[in-house]
Structures are given as structure tokens and as C-alpha cells.
Image (tube, rainbow, N blue to C red):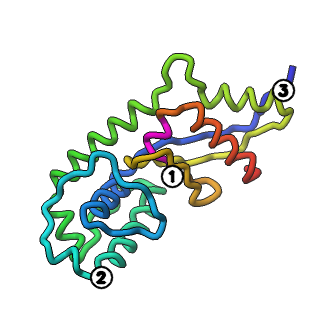
Amino acid sequence: MGSVSSAPWEVALGYSYHLAAALAVRDALGIRDPLGLPAVVARPSLAVDATVHSDRGVDAEWLRWWERALAASEQDESAVPLSPGGLLGRIVEDNRDVVRLWSAERKRDVANASRPGRGAPRMRDAVREYERTTGTRLGGFRLKVTALPITGTLFLPISTNRILISAELLRHREEYVRRVIAHVTAEGI
């Protein structure tokens, strides 16, 4: 019988309103982000002035907003204002209720997808099984996983301890767990 890790480990799964809002606005304006993240699920219909689509500064403004939202998602983002300021800030403010409702629905989707169904592998069981079958002890790692309301099965490590995933990947629990364990072993954390 193999031993199991006694070192503490944690995979904290969460949702970011700020990141979801930024992605919804990105898609409404047709902004191409450098990460190439897929389109949001059930894109909300936002009221946007037609001149915004031709404004060249919007892409750069969006990228700055995305980077701030990504940084805020590492901590208590409730302390960080949602509005990116400038032109995008006006769009967010004009569509605040639509974005909040859309995001609340997507957050429920993430919550539902994160509940493992019968027979679905649980992270703790998969870690134990990995340790038992390989003889390699995992532990001492802390991952922050943020589920995004986007299409496809995204798994995007943005640092050693931070991963962006799609809510769709959560629905494929076995694949999600496999990728987390592969990341932990590849990074040696």
C-alpha cells in the first residue's frame, strides 16, 4: 500500500465578476485580446454607441482593464471598482445591470458545474490515487483556479499557482482533475 501525502494542499476554485465583465464587453465590441480567449457563453446584448467600434484606443484600453481585473482576481476583488474608466467605463456604467445579471447567471453555471456528480472523480481522491500508483508524493501546493464563462475547454496556467479555466471544462470533471494534477507535477509544486 502506497503512502499518501501529509503535506497540505489546496485547489481553490472561484469565479471573477471583473474578468467575466471584461470578457463580455470585449465580445460586445469585437475586441481581439492577445490571449485569444474564446467567446463568452450566452453573450449579453450591450447598448454600445456605433462610434466605439471604430475607436482605435479601445483595444489598448480593454487590455489595461483586463490586466487590472486579472490582478484584482488574486485578492478580494470586491474592494476594486469594476469600472475601467474612460470610454469602456462609460459602456460598463451604461450596461451595469445587464452585465451584473448576465454574470450572476454565469456564476450559477460555474457553481453547478463545480459540483461533482455521482461517480465523478474528486480532487482529493485523484491526488491520493496518483500518489498511490506513482509512488510520488504531492502536497504543499496551493492553486487558485478561476472559472471563466467562455466556450470550449480552456485550461490556461497564468503562473505557477494561478490557472484560468472555462466553466465547460468543469463539466468534464475527469479531464479537469487530470489537467490540475498534470500541472502540479509538471511545475514541481
Give the distance between the C-alpha atoms of the residues marked 3 and 1, in whole angstroms: 31 Å
- The stretch of residues the image draws in magenta is 165-170
Q: CA distance from mark 2 to mark 1?
A: 26 Å
- Give the main secondary structure of the magenta stretch: helix
Which three-letter amino acid code belongs to the residue tagged 1? Leu
Rendered view: 85 above or below 69: below
Q: Residue at x 31, y 64 (%)?
A: 26
Q: Residue at x 67, y 29 (%)?
A: 126
Is residue 167 a member of the stretch shown in magenta? yes
Question: Element under label 1?
Answer: strand
* Residue 117 image position (x, y, % from top left): 49, 21
- Along the horizontal axis of the image, is 42 left or right of 117? left
At horizontal 41% and vertical 54% (from top left) the residue drawn is 76
**Which label was assigned to residue 164?**
1
Q: Earlier in the sequence, mark 2 or mark 1?
A: 2
Residue 57 image label? 2
